[in-house]
Image (cartoon, grey):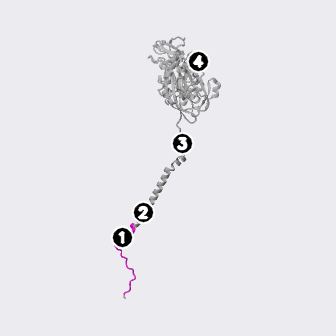
């Protein structure tokens, strides 16, 4: 008898079963996709709601409560117009500064214009002299923005040219300029027009040089000495290395000066009559103050060459020379030495310890002689002597520069015998610094803006 089987029958998979499986699978996928769509929609609605809220309602809150970095204020500008009424010409220096934290001023721009002759040349016609100054003011008006005219101080300071005039004639010129200033748009007062003291001229020149060289922002012991050779006078100014000793030896030439909130003692000496143009006149008239002069310091080829100084016109003729057509250098030098000795010079020993910067006619004559280029440079006292001897030995008459030998010889003798500088002393000769004119007017402008007219 066959035993019955206990094995379950094998399951048979049919086509109907596959359809059922696929339908279940598709249904599950649709359910998942619907869930995802619903979830994404909810997230989108929430995002739109939050964005709309902060855009519409919360922006003012953030504007009011978020601390922003304050912007830096624009530096306030300051302008000054200074007229330098010198012996050989009048100049305007219009300056633009910006005020910086701490109360200091930073130089931004400048205008420098010169007209000739100098104001002192109009001593007999003061109105015409004032007209020459008016030309300069017209230029300054174009430089200073109109909205700043009323707040811009205007000052004219006359130097050696007017100091050498009789008081009545100098006053006549000053009064005409005062009348001119009353009808100009800049700020003026009773102190706007004056003859400047030689000491102040030296102090302002010294400040200008050291300000432009950026030597006033640290230790003032790093400053340089300033030598300014003008037409009628020369100024020497520096900080002594030993102020107490300097005050003891030369008290009349030591001035307490406030610089960048620091008080220092400055040596400053102005020598009226030792300017280059004044020295020429002294050399020409060494044997008498005649208008027709004969001088060994000029080539014999010069016949009645006109030379104007202090309202006088001299006619200069060259003296015969044992050097032929050349100038007798030693003879000319001896006359100059005698002229320099007529003016007492205190020869401050401390000047030898200073870094010296010389400008004005020092620079001009050195450039004429080829000692320095347009940018200036360093020379020695000896090099001035050598240039003088070379020029005096020239046999070709220079009609455009008939007094070149005299000028170079005078500068040499003045530096060595007048101020006691050894032959090997190095001197930096400059006309501008970083494009800015070296003029006492910059120092005067800075002083006026800080302290008033």
* Tags 1 and 2 touching, CB below 8 Å: no
Q: Earlier in the sequence, mark 4 or mark 1?
A: 1
Q: Earlier in the sequence, mark 1 or mark 2?
A: 1
* Distance (Cα) linking label 1 and label 3: 74 Å
Q: Magenta segment range? A: 2-26
Observer-side mark, 1 or 2, equals 2
The residue identified by callout 2 is 34
Can residue 409 be seen by looking at this rendering?
no
* Distance (Cα) linking label 1 and label 2: 23 Å
Q: Earlier in the sequence, mark 3 or mark 4?
A: 3
Badge 3 crowding class, 10 Å Cα cut-off, few under 14, some 14 to 19, many 20 or more, is few
Could you say which disc has been placed on residue 343 in the image? 4
Observer-side mark, 3 or 4, equals 3
* Distance (Cα) linking label 3 and label 4: 62 Å
Asked if the stretch drawn in magenta spans residue 317, the answer is no
Residue 173, image quadrant: top right
Q: Secondary structure at mark 3?
A: loop
Residue 201 at what x, y percent from top left? 57, 24
The residue identified by callout 3 is 70
Residue 403 at what x, y percent from top left? 49, 17
Could you say which disc has been placed on residue 19 in the image? 1
Q: Earlier in the sequence, mark 2 or mark 4?
A: 2
Badge 4 crowding class, 10 Å Cα cut-off, few under 14, some 14 to 19, many 20 or more, is few
Residue 318 at what x, y percent from top left? 48, 13
Instruction: Identify which residue is drawn at 62% across, 31% down.
Output: 263
């Amino acid at each position: 008898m066959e035993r019955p089987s206990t094995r379950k029958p094998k399951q048979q998979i049919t086509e109907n079963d596959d359809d059922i499986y696929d339908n279940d699978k598709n249904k599950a996928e649709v359910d998942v996709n619907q869930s995802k769509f619903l979830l994404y929609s909810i997230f989108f609605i929430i995002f739109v709601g939050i964005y709309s809220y902060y855009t519409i309602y919360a922006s003012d809150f953030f504007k009011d409560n978020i601390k922003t970095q304050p912007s830096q204020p624009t530096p306030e500008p300051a302008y000054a117009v200074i007229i330098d009424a010198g012996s050989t010409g009048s100049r305007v220096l219009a300056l633009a500064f910006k005020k910086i934290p701490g109360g200091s001023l930073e130089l931004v721009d400048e205008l420098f214009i010169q007209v000739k002759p100098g104001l002192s040349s109009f001593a007999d016609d003061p109105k015409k002299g004032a007209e020459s100054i008016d030309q300069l003011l017209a230029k300054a008006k174009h430089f200073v923005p109109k909205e700043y005219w009323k707040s811009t101080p205007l000052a004219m300071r006359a130097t050696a040219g007017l100091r050498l005039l009789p008081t009545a004639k100098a006053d006549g010129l000053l009064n005409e300029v005062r009348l001119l200033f009353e009808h100009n748009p800049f700020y003026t007062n009773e102190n706007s027009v004056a003859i400047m003291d030689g000491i102040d001229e030296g102090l302002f020149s010294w400040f200008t040089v050291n300000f432009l060289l950026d030597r006033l922002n640290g230790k003032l012991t790093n400053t340089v000495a300033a030598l300014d050779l003008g037409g009628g006078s020369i100024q020497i100014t520096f900080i002594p290395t030993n102020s107490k000793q300097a005050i003891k030896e030369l008290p009349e030439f030591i001035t307490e000066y406030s610089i960048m909130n620091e008080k220092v003692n400055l040596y400053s000496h102005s020598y009226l009559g030792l300017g280059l143009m004044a020295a020429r006149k002294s050399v020409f008239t060494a044997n008498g103050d005649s208008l027709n002069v004969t001088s060994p310091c000029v080539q014999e080829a010069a016949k009645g060459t006109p030379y104007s100084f202090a309202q006088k016109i001299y006619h200069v003729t060259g003296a015969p020379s044992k050097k032929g057509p050349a100038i007798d250098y030693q003879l000319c030098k001896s006359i100059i030495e005698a002229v320099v000795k007529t003016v007492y010079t205190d020869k401050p020993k401390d000047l030898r310890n200073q870094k010296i910067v010389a400008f004005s006619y020092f620079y001009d004559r050195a450039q004429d002689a080829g000692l320095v280029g347009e940018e200036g440079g360093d020379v020695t006292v000896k090099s001035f002597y050598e240039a003088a001897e070379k020029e005096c030995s020239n046999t070709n008459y220079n009609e455009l520069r008939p007094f070149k030998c005299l000028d170079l010889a005078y500068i040499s003798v003045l530096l060595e015998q007048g101020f006691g500088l050894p032959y090997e002393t190095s001197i930096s000769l400059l006309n501008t610094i970083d494009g800015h004119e070296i003029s006492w007017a910059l120092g005067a402008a800075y002083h006026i803006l800080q302290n008033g007219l």
